[in-house]
Amino acid sequence: MVAFTARAHTNIALLKYWGKVDQQLIIPTTTSISLTLDEFYTETTVEFDPALPNDQITLDQQPLKEKDRHKISIFLNLIRTQAQINTFARVQSVNHVPTAAGLASSASAFAALAGAGSAAAGLNLSQADLSRLARQGSGSASRSIFGGFVQWDRGTDHQTSVAHPLQENVDWPIQLLTVIVSDQPKKINSRGGMQNAMQNSPFYQNWVERSNGLVKPMQTAINQHDLATLGTIAEQNALEMHAQNMVANPPFFYLTDISWQIINLVQDLRQSGLQVYATMDAGPNVKIISHPDDTPTIKSALFKILPEISIQVATPGPGLTVWQNGAAHA
Ligand code: PMV
């Protein structure tokens, strides 16, 4: 059968997804909003081949560990069922999301796999259907189907829990500086962390209500190109997500001393008049939302307190592209 390749970019949530009402289908408790990033992406090629005795999967030319291979095979089963085929697949994935970038690659990985896998199986899915499919691999992957600012409606079932673009072409100045605190694998992955918070935080319901209440103000900030409001809401939402983890019983923490030093610096820079805001996911790295003109000032302030730190700059990026192997890539 024909091989297809897909490229999907990773995304950073400005309003976080942190908990699900349906573990199997991945239906979240909150609507989330993200920004897709240009610099970091995954490229995946899929070919279904009747000669294969099982799924053969490589990531960066290395065979996957059994646990990860199993996860991908389960995802491929969704595609096989829909396409009514039972052939195994050859999957070659290359990550352009440096592990050290501290950005989750599962969003770009499952979005690219959904795109290449469905095309290789002969399915011609709409973008919304690709988002629904990618969501079942990793919640945040539902948003990586689209470029720019994207909203994942929490919905109530498989059909209604789907992402859509809010602003695909971001033609106003906004960027994300990723400050690498640690490139070590996190102790509690996002799946386990959100489950813990949901079950063990006394304020979890409050988080759900507050987060869903921030959707409209965030949409307005995006529409009005209002970096200050967007950043203020994003920082507040990220801190509230981390607060859930800190007050869970037992508590757990993703942020380290260094993360807090950076968050404090962001506040100091803001007090000095800069539009800089912090957001953090299921790990210690801090992402700084800012105006591109302020990059030199922010970088030199960071290097002053943390000379060893590494910083990556990311700008708004495009949605999923899929092409047949051998055909020209637009
Ligand atoms: O999609 P997952 O299972 O990797 O979870 C993502 C969770 C956060 O990154 C913390 C928030 C988000 O909305 O991306």
Image (spheres, rainbow, N blue to C red):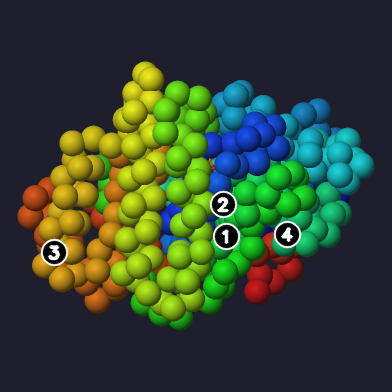
For marks 3 and 2, give the CA distance. 31 Å
Residue 257 visible from this viewpoint: yes
Q: CA distance from mark 4 to mark 3?
A: 42 Å
Outermost bottom residue: 171
Looking at the picture, tell me which residue is in the foreground, 185 or 147: 147
**Coordinates of residue 199 in the picture (x, y in percent):** 50, 25
- How far is mark 1 from mark 2, CA to CA? 7 Å
Residue, disc 3: 271
Looking at the rendered structure, the secondary structure element under dot 1 is strand
Q: Which residue corresponds to mark 4?
A: 128
Of the residues under marks 4 and 3, which one precedes in the sequence?
4
Crowdedness near tag 2: few (<14), some (14–19) or many (≥20) residues, C-alpha within 10 Å: many
**Separation of disc 4 and disc 1 at Cα?**
12 Å
Type of residue at label 1? Gln
> Is tag 4's residue or tag 1's residue first in the polypeptide sequence?
4
Q: Secondary structure at mark 2?
A: loop
Residue bearing the label numbered 2: 31
